[in-house]
Amino acid sequence: KMIDFSGNNVANEFEELAWMEHLTGLQGLKMHACNFLHNGIPPYLAKLTNLLHLDVSNTLFNGKLSGEIFSKLTNLTYLALGGNSYNSSFPTEIATLPNLNYLNAENAELSGNLLFMESMTNALEIRLGGNAGITGTIPSSVGKLKALRALSISFCNLSGSLPSELGLLNNLELLQLQNNNLSGEIPNEISSLTTLKTLRLEENKITGEVPICALRDFNLLNFATDCKLPNPEVGCTCCTCCEAPCKDTHEVIHDIPEVLGGVGIQIDDGGHVQEAAMFLEGDPSVAAYDKSTIIQRFALACIWFSTTEFERENVVGGFYDSISNWATDDGWMSYSDECSWHGIYCNGNGTVTGIRLSYNNLTGIIPLEISL
């Protein structure tokens, strides 16, 4: 009940996409980075009312984002829309989908304000970064999103102050608001977010003394403001970055040896172990990972480095490029969720429960680290 065409040079256009409307039993459809062309989101998708997972990011679905198409997709839990040019506001029909947990609409040429977010009370992740047309303030109603774990609205044109209601998001782990026009001081209420791992506020007009340094004693690994001496806009004694460009990996890179050492792994042993650790260090989202996720991604990376040939190469979305061996390695060694990698099966908590790489032309050895 899942079809994944992602990353292929297929190029259906307009009516050639009509095959979609006949797959009414489909629960998952991924078309990321395909050359599918349509004026906006194809209306054929409206008939796929059983969809749980839909990824149309980085296609050629350019044009107004129609909410009517999504109004009947009430089972959707995951929606990726980014990388297309919609030149429109965000439809309320999407925001009111009752089961939507994950939304990525980054770099999509969206415009308008953020008032639609107040309807997304079941959201776990909302990513809207890179939309310069998004303006206005962060509404106080953001405090209603009690389940939210990640909120990214960087590189937009937001203004006004940070609402104190952000302090009500007790499950929040990642808050990225850098490169906006936000002003005022950081509210004291944010100091209650003890689950917060990454807080990015640099490249704004925020001023004053930071009142939340106590969070560094909990989970806050990465904290960036405009605090560069000798003339800081923000007074901060606990920030991990005071001048853009900041990276979310600033401190967690140094924690990787300690985390892996805790399970008996020495990353200076060379070979696949060292390569896997280097892969983790290059992951831009590593600061948001807990210990179990770091170990899980490390173990999977060890499998890959032990059973394929590779060359190191800086590419978008990943650090390595396979040059031989595996018949299929979709997703592997990219910075996407490891549960989306070819042959990896996870439970609802994101824990790997199965690996299926049969007849995949693996060579070399199966590493001991698979037991982690």
Image: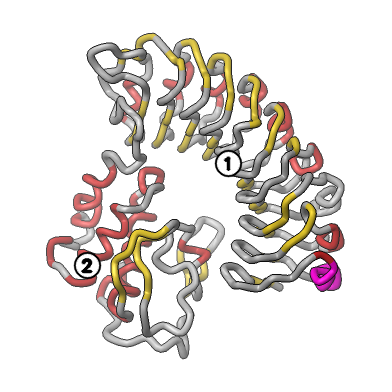
Q: Residue pushed farthest left?
A: 269
Which mark is drawn over residue 84?
none
Q: Which residues are magenta?
A: 15-24
Q: Amino acid at mark 1?
A: Arg
Q: Residue at x 48, y 58 (%)?
A: 337
Q: Residues within 10 Å of mark 2 (few under 14, many from 20)?
A: many
Residue 24 shows in this picture: no
Quick check: 331 left or right of 139? left
- For marks 1 and 2, the one nearer the N-term is 1
Q: Residue at x 61, y 72 (%)?
A: 9
Q: Nearer the viewer, residue 192 or 301?
A: 301
Cα–Cα gap, marks 1 and 2: 33 Å
Image coordinates of residue 283 in percent, x first then y, are 36, 52
Image coordinates of residue 232 in percent, x first then y, are 31, 14
Residue 77 among those drawn in magenta: no
Q: Quadrant of residue 23?
A: bottom right
Query: Which quadrant, please, contains the C terminus?
Result: bottom left
Q: Which residue is mark 2?
A: 273
Q: Which residue is mark 1?
A: 127
Give the number of the mark in front: 1 or 2. Answer: 1
Image coordinates of residue 216 in percent, x first then y, are 31, 28
Residue 19 among those drawn in magenta: yes
